[in-house]
């Protein structure tokens, strides 16, 4: 048993460790001419086709061009994003079946490849097909950069293959009969080293995004603060990554008043997860990532309504992203120094729970009156940001499912981005373009800070005025960041789960693993 914990014991069948080899698709590269390869089903990618011209895609076998022409004439396929046409028993270029996948606009870059990879996997899953080759050249020749296209494709395949079935009892007979796609070959005429490396990079990014999803999807009784911390430690084994866990006694010694205040209402002990990776030159100031690891948020005494409260198991998705990003950064041996910090607790209503009006002292000595116990994320982040600032970092990024207000403002499309450092904003936007994780800059100003001033303490944990709930939350966080330190905060309350209406590589319901890839990309930008 991972943790001796009564909550966890409820799940007698609960797995100790996520088994990567059981959950990922096996993707291999093969150097061959597609017509000579011979396979059961061949996946071919096609860019948007002009209706007024004869279909004649360069370097594509005439038989494939003919099939595309046929589909275009019938109005069945025109190469748009998420579009497919499946030819059974086409028996061309050495394959039995052919699946065409639309690319949409390849200028969109890695994201177009990611979506196309997911489109293919979803279509094949429906057909119960198992022996598959992808014509990699038909994808890469449409992109400016073959490596980026390959990376995106691999990410799309692996992300779309993610499933969360840990707590469903298995029907062994059914599982035996079920044909499941477990292996995909990517076939190309030439395979330069950059393409091979891009494939590996895509694999790592998807693996850790899926791990963050798994942290998020696991129910709160299987993902308590202590269990999350244990997973961070276990996953770091064999990687050049130092993981230190502070328990409640240590948190008391270290004056982590925010984490302790929020944890008071729960029988679960809080944890502070510190992950340190030193891949950069000695003395290089670290890049700090901080993530909210609230494993369940019922709101505390200021309790939330019952409807959809189960979704508050996802309130640790920021923390999950930081843990997963640090693991990925270490796996990739990036040449940069990075620290990941995750304050983790439950927010419940036990007899010791903080009450509206209670005052707490954060690690940096600032006092906060807790006027709404449901605004708890900022309280635990306050301590973590204070600690981060003490590490003399070159920059601090925080991410959290922080406010319902950001869901109202941006829905599940964009992550809210708050920073007063415009250069940092541009850097984040650039990273987000590569990873496909959209961000939208929101304001944070001195007026918002003013709204967070306390009456009986230095600060209040909710605004004195109406509206701007996400900006005032960001302004509150700023109060715990050291003077002059570049800081950006990403509010993922809208983008952390249930986003499949837009993203076909995201699970229908469940955690998205958002910000893992953007944080890795950001770390790279400081290398
Ligand atoms: N975890 C919630 C934010 C949240 C709400 C995330 C809905 C995703 C969906 C956070 O702890 C919270 O409850 N925030 C309050 C703050 C308010 C009391 C100032 C909110 O947004 O309502
Ligand atoms: Zn809350
Ligand atoms: Zn919360």
Image (cartoon, grey):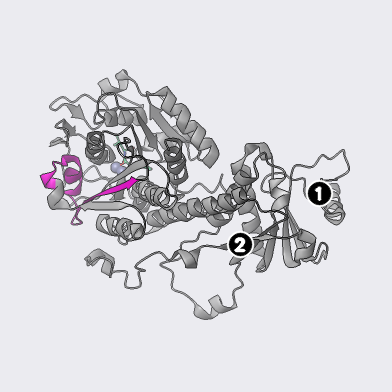
Instruction: Tell me which image quadrant ligand 1 sits in.
Output: top left
Question: Would residue 423 be found to the left or right of residue 127 on screen?
Answer: left
Image coordinates for residue 193, horizontal then vertical, percent: 61, 51
Report whether residue 351 is seen.
no
State if disc 2 and disc 1 touch (CB < 8 Å).
no
Image position, residue 92 (x, y; %): 83, 62
Q: Position of residue 423 (x, y in %)?
A: 43, 24
Q: Is residue 130 left or right of residue 440?
A: right
- Residue at the spot of label 2: 28
| Residue at left offset 27%, top offset 27% | 463
Which structural element holds mark 1? loop
Q: CA distance from mark 1 to mark 2?
A: 23 Å
Taking the spot 67% from the left edge, 38% from the top edge, the residue there is 144
Quadrant into which the C terminus falls:
top left
Image: 508 above or below 374: below
| Mark 1, residue position | 59
List the single residue furthest toward the bottom.
173
Would you identify the image quadrant in which residue 354 lies?
Answer: top left
Disc number placed over residue 67 in the picture, else none: none
Does the magenta run of residues contain 247? no
Q: Indicate left or right for 119 with 347 as reference.
A: right
Please provide percent x and percent y for residue 424.
42, 28
Magenta range is 252-278
- Compared with 1, 256 (above or below) is above
């Amino acid at each position: 048993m991972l943790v001796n914990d009564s909550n966890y014991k409820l799940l007698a069948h609960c797995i100790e460790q996520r088994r990567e080899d059981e959950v990922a698709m096996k993707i291999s590269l093969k150097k061959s001419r597609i017509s000579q390869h011979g396979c059961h089903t061949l996946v071919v990618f096609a860019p948007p086709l002009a209706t007024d011209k004869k279909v004649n895609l360069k370097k594509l076998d005439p038989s494939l061009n003919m099939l595309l022409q046929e589909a275009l004439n019938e109005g069945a396929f025109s190469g748009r994003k998420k579009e497919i046409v499946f030819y059974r028993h086409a028996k061309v270029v050495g394959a039995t079946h052919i699946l065409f996948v639309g690319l949409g606009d390849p200028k969109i870059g890695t994201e177009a490849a990611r979506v196309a990879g997911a489109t293919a996997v979803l279509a094949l899953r429906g057909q119960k097909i198992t022996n598959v080759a992808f014509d990699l050249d038909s994808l890469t020749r449409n992109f400016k950069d073959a490596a980026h296209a390959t990376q995106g494709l691999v990410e799309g395949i692996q992300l779309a293959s993610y499933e969360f079935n840990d707590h469903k009892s298995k029907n062994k007979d059914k599982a035996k009969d079920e044909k499941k796609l477990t292996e995909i070959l990517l076939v190309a005429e030439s395979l330069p080293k950059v393409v091979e490396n891009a494939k590996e990079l895509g694999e790592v990014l998807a693996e850790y995004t899926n791990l963050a999803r798994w942290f998020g999807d696991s129910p709160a009784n299987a993902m308590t603060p202590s269990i999350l911390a244990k997973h961070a430690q276990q996953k770091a084994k064999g990687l050049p990554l130092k993981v230190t866990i502070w328990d409640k006694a240590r948190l008391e010694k270290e004056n982590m008043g925010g984490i302790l205040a929020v944890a008071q209402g729960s029988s679960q002990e809080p944890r502070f997860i510190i992950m340190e990776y030193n891949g950069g030159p000695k003395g290089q100031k670290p890049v700090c990532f901080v993530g909210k690891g609230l494993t369940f948020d019922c709101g505390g005494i200021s309790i939330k309504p019952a409807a959809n409260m189960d979704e508050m198991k996802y309130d640790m998705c920021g923390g999950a992203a930081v843990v997963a990003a640090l693991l990925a950064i270490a796996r990739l041996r990036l040449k940069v120094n990075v620290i990941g910090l995750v304050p983790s607790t439950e927010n419940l209503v036990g007899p010791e729970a903080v009450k509206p009006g209670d005052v707490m002292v954060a690690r940096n000595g600032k006092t906060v009156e807790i006027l709404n116990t449901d605004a708890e994320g900022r309280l635990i982040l306050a301590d973590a940001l204070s600690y981060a600032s003490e590490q003399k970092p070159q920059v601090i990024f925080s991410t959290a499912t922080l406010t319902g207000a950001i869901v109202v403002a941006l829905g599940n499309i964009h992550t809210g981005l708050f920073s007063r450092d415009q250069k940092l904003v541009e850097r984040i936007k650039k990273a987000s373009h590569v990873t496909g994780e959209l961000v939208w800059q929101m304001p944070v100003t001195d007026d918002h800070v003013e709204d967070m001033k306390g009456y009986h303490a230095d600060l209040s944990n909710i605004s004195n005025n109406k509206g701007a709930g996400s900006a005032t939350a960001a302004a509150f966080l700023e109060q715990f960041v050291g003077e002059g330190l570049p800081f950006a905060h990403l509010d993922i309350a809208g983008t952390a789960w249930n986003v499949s209406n837009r993203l076909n590589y995201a699970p229908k319901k469940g955690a998205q693993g958002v910000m893992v890839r953007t944080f890795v990309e950001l770390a790279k930008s400081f290398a």
